[in-house]
Amino acid sequence: MKNYTITFLQEQLSIAVPEGTTLLDAEIQAGLQPDAPCGGQGSCGKCIVRIISGPVTGILKACSVHIQGDMTVDTSLKATGHSLLTKGSSREIIVAPMIQSVDVEVEKCRIGESDSDWDRLKTAVAAKSSVPPASVPPNVSVAGTLYEILKSSDYKPNVILCHNEILDVRREHTPYYLAAFDIGTTSIVGYLMDGCSGEEIAVSSMLNPQSQYGADVIMRSNYALDGHLEQLSTAVRQAMNQILQALAEQAAIEIRDIYQVSFVGNTCMHHLFLGISPGALVHSPYNPSLSEPLILPAKEYGIRIHPEGRLMVLPNIAGFVGADTVGCLLATNFSKRDNMTLMIDIGTNGELVMGNKERMITCSTAAGPAFEGAKITCGMRGANGAIDHVTFQGERLVYSTIGDEKPAGICGSGLMDTVSLLLQHGFLEESGRLYSPEELEHPIAKANAHRLVTIDNISAFMLAFPEETERQEPVFLSQKDIREVQLAKGAIAAGIQLLCRNLDIAVEDIREVLIAGAFGNYMSPESACNIGLIPPVLRERITPVGNAAGEGSKIALMNYTEFQHTRHLASGIEFLELAAESEFQDTFVDELEFPLPEEMRECE
Amino acid sequence: MKNYTITFLQEQLSIAVPEGTTLLDAEIQAGLQPDAPCGGQGSCGKCIVRIISGPVTGILKACSVHIQGDMTVDTSLKATGHSLLTKGSSREIIVAPMIQSVDVEVEKCRIGESDSDWDRLKTAVAAKSSVPPASVPPNVSVAGTLYEILKSSDYKPNVILCHNEILDVRREHTPYYLAAFDIGTTSIVGYLMDGCSGEEIAVSSMLNPQSQYGADVIMRSNYALDGHLEQLSTAVRQAMNQILQALAEQAAIEIRDIYQVSFVGNTCMHHLFLGISPGALVHSPYNPSLSEPLILPAKEYGIRIHPEGRLMVLPNIAGFVGADTVGCLLATNFSKRDNMTLMIDIGTNGELVMGNKERMITCSTAAGPAFEGAKITCGMRGANGAIDHVTFQGERLVYSTIGDEKPAGICGSGLMDTVSLLLQHGFLEESGRLYSPEELEHPIAKANAHRLVTIDNISAFMLAFPEETERQEPVFLSQKDIREVQLAKGAIAAGIQLLCRNLDIAVEDIREVLIAGAFGNYMSPESACNIGLIPPVLRERITPVGNAAGEGSKIALMNYTEFQHTRHLASGIEFLELAAESEFQDTFVDELEFPLPEEMRECE
């Protein structure tokens, strides 16, 4: 069996160990007394190290690394080795953010010496981290008050590092914070995280104030291109500041102690936030102006965290596959999956990713915002009063509303349930046409024939009669609304078909279907399959993964190796432009039809 | 004889040539048709290349490189191969600034492709330069308008590079400019340079407006430490903006077309400009807070050039040996000198550098501002009306004034001439005491005995009687003024002695004495030796090198390799803290005495 040499950087010692030894055991043998309360079971996350060179590199749990070659290891991360259980995806993430806090001891200058305090600080940082002095860029602002801080801290300050940059030098070791954002077209959510423990300590959200300039990305892009780009940028940046303020108040912390903000969003939200013209996004061939992962000075974007704080932006993939999709990939550990997986993120557009660790392919479908309640006569977002689920109990139609309030409209999941029910009980032809009351055959349909009405000359299905509702106005689904659902589900279903063809697999080869987004949590997988949004054969393989984009934003924020990985995630995924595929139109038209109830039964 | 392989990056071809071949010949043999109008004589500077790897690297004239190993060469600099003859030092500098202008062709995105316009731009830049795409950091601001610029330039824009950064993408190839500054305690000078030809196209200067807050660096530092740092920073930055405005007006260019500003200054000017507390500079052990060479976003410092423009700051050496000294070293090619050289920069402090290409050592002497006219009763700066030279024609005292105006005071060179004359003609004891009229022996002295007067109870030598002057007030040199000159000259002379001892050489081993600063141009080397400021034995070896600090600022600006070299210049020079040398006080006291006229004659 081979021996390999492990060099521990801070301790300045090397040890030779046999192949296959865990790095944790190597540390123990070297006498380093690593902190591993779980006894190397991989559950406590305390034993994390940064592997600087070797067959694997990055931040890893020492107990999980089986030595396969010579390595150089930085053990200075030990103190902050917590792990973070993300909500949506249940992925365990080691807390090792780009922003680190290190206590250092700076050597005092003696008479006759000429090197600067900044040089001395860099040497002190190198002694406590894996950051070589030559790699630290000068920070004039930090140098500006360095003399006074060194004196008042008795030359033992606390340093805030951003990878190899020194962002702040503080008189003493106090907590520091980070904030992750998910900037949606409709709403913005911010999460405040403790930089050291990795705990989520506050959450706050608000509607995206850009909505006043247009409901969807196309309207906002056009408004930006009409000379209002700055207005849109300012709106979303101010919203971020408001959320940061709310988070700081909730957690009773100083906003100045927040050193990094990460965000994900679709390409349009990404460009508008950064002040990038959306021209390239809305003109053929629809590519982004800028895609790569970014670390930017937050103050240049008007974000009021610590003045030296950084903005972390996840990369885009294609013109309509943005950083939000990269966030979803990160949260679902997509690029490491063995099983063939389909991820669907349904919002104003529907983004699809299909593949596994071997190969990944993505496309964007113009699914329209029907499932967000837009373009639906009685549609609304998933807010209080929205009918979110519908079923028949015997012959009686029963619905539930969000907040148990009187119905005010119908949201995406209610919409999907309703269409599914109409199909199952013979109110609706597979072509998408509502039958007339006389054509009804199913006994439940016959018993509810009075719900088939005509409103404004369009046939409709009545969900809630005026007397049942808050504003004494009916909540119904019209023939036109059903057409919108057909267009949306047809686009997504066709996208799934084309991804399968490009991967040369059959639909039934997909082992897992992950539904991202809040909508994914509310929608009934059963209904999604009944209406053919998701191929019925995948009915049992569907898992909602919650706000995976937001989770991805948190993961990148809390683990720098994961953030660095996003570059490869974004560049390693293939992009399928549906509009450029000759079969797309045919497939789309085929998929406009709803599945027959018979087909449903066959699949069960 | 060995053969070596030369790889030409842009042309994607390699050629094997025998050892010792010039790189220019290798280019010719490879069929590259290099532009070399001088036929390889080294005089035209057109054949410059960037050697990326090999026994030597950097920007060099191909005709000057004799091949000693395999090399990778970037020939894309050819077009801007001019050279710049600097005024003070007569050094020939190849024009190869950090800021470069490149015309590129960007490939249009086609449908089905997903990469960003920014990625395409990076690829296009790489095809025309030695900047690999992966090394280009993202520039959100440039990406922000990229789509529109690409469209309107038909995808053939002009790119402004700052080393590996893209600062601007322009619709067409137009000139671009750079500006070099010398920020003195008293005055600020700016030079506007054409980025392509390297020509100096305008010069402008003004008094340093910080003077209103204190005449010297100590007063200004104390004012800064009293809570007025920002006020001092703003004052000098605004002055830079005013000069930039004046330069742009003189040259009839847009200020937006200036992409870089370099500056040198003493450590205090350096810290105050950048907003760094001068606390470390004025408290023992007097080291800088920040020394290293800097490239900074100009807009962060309120400098109104192109919004993406960069500020280039030369490094400091020690607490009282600043970037101005580094500028002087650069201008005088100090680190490449064969001869043992002494450089003296006399201002509010006197900085000394001694050495050659083997070893360099520097010290700062508290020479005081006497030679700038401060603390001298009738002292003034070298402005109109200042007596700048004094001599005897026969028995008659003759002086000249700047601008040929009636005398208003005396400046540094006049001061030195006067003290020299007083010594030579027996008005002054070597101890520095003015003789009384009765003690005079020299015939010229006797004939001018009426010039020895008593003013305010102090003996004095009258240079200009009230009736000769503009304001009907006498211009004279008092016993107290002579003591100030003694203190200043004693400090410098002692510094020279200690540098010699540290280098283990005798004073006469110094082959060249370079006097930097405007004062160096005006002062009489003869007088400087007569009063013992410079050891009389070096009388014939003195060369004034003009505003070498400003020349150094220009050189760094116009040749990036020279700028990069400043890091090694600053870190490679040894620093001698005179105050920490036990012999300093004795040597200083010895050097307070003036040389005897006999000694002078012996040396002649």
Image (cartoon, coloured by chain):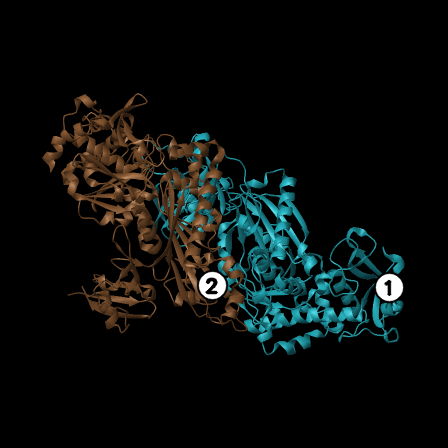
Chain colours: A brown, B cyan
**Residue topped by disc 2:** A169
**Residue topped by disc 1:** B395
Percent across and percent down for residue B249 are: 65, 40
Q: Is mark 1 on a helix, strand or loop?
A: loop
Which quadrant of the rendered structure holds the C terminus of chain B? bottom right
Above or below residue A538? Residue B528 is below
Front of the two marks 2 and 1 = 2
Above or below residue B566? Residue B320 is below
Cβ atoms at labels 2 and 1 below 8 Å apart: no
Above or below residue A331? Residue B475 is below
Q: Specify the farthest residue to the left.
A: A602
Percent across and percent down for residue B495 are: 62, 70
Q: Which amino acid does label 2 sit on?
A: Val
Dot 1 alpha-carbon crowd within 10 angstroms: few under 14, some 14 to 19, many 20 or more? few
Number of dots carrying numbers: 2
User: What label does residue B299 carry, if any?
Assistant: none
Looking at the image, which is closer to me, B18 or A413? A413
Structural distance between the alpha carbons of marks 2 and 1? 68 Å
Residue A230 visible in rendering: yes
Q: Specify the farthest residue to the front.
A: A467
Residue sitting at 34 percent across and 62 percent down? A197
Residue A76 visible in rendering: no
Left/right placement of residue A261 relative to residue A75 reads right
Left/right placement of residue A30 relative to residue B156 reads left
